[in-house]
Amino acid sequence: MCIPHRQLDPRTRARVVIANLALFIGLILWLFVHPASAIGRDVIHFASGILIGLSIMINLNTFTRGRSAPRGDNDDSNARRS
């Protein structure tokens, strides 16, 4: 998906960027953090799981909202018409 070339409203674009960053950090966290104890490993595993889950939740929420909205119409355009 190419975010800059899509016709997305700024809030939707921001949600997609946040979700992608959470996914990236959740996946890359294991490469840069090397805990010395088992509790540290559990904390890193917990944090990466939360970030990956957050990414999935934000992406699903954003794309289901975008699919249910009428094409070419977003929340901001309705506010401008009033």
Image (tube, helix red, strand yellow):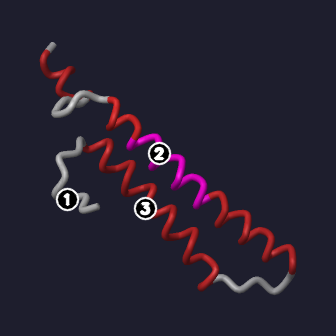
Rendered view: 28 above or below 73: below
Q: Amino acid at mark 2?
A: Leu
Numbered marks: total: 3
Image quarter hosting the C terminus: top left
Residue at image location 58% in from the left, 61% down from the top: 52
Q: Position of residue 11 (x, y in %)?
A: 31, 42
33 displayed left or right of 5: right
Nearer the observer, 74 or 40 = 74
> Which one is earlier in the sequence, the residue at label 2 or at label 1?
1
Disc 3 residue type (three-letter): Asn
Mark-to-mark CA distance, 3 and 2: 12 Å
Residue 21 location in percent, x, y?
A: 45, 64
Q: Secondary structure at mark 2?
A: helix
Label 1: how many residues lie within 10 Å, few (<14), some (14-19) or many (20+)? Answer: few
Q: Are marks 1 and 3 in contact (CB under 8 Å)?
A: no
Give the residue at mark 2: 60
Q: Residues within 10 Å of mark 3 (few under 14, many from 20)?
A: some
Label 3 sits on residue: 20
Region of the chain picked out in magenta, as a range: 51-63
- Looking at the picture, tell me which residue is in the foreground, 53 or 42: 53
The residue singled out by tag 1 in the image is: 4
User: 68 above or below 52?
Assistant: above
- CA–CA distance between discs 2 and 1? 19 Å
SS category of the residue bearing label 1: loop
User: Mark 1 vs mark 3: which is more N-terminal?
Assistant: 1
Main secondary structure of the magenta stretch: helix
Q: Amino acid at mark 1?
A: Pro
Q: Quadrant of the N terminus?
A: bottom left
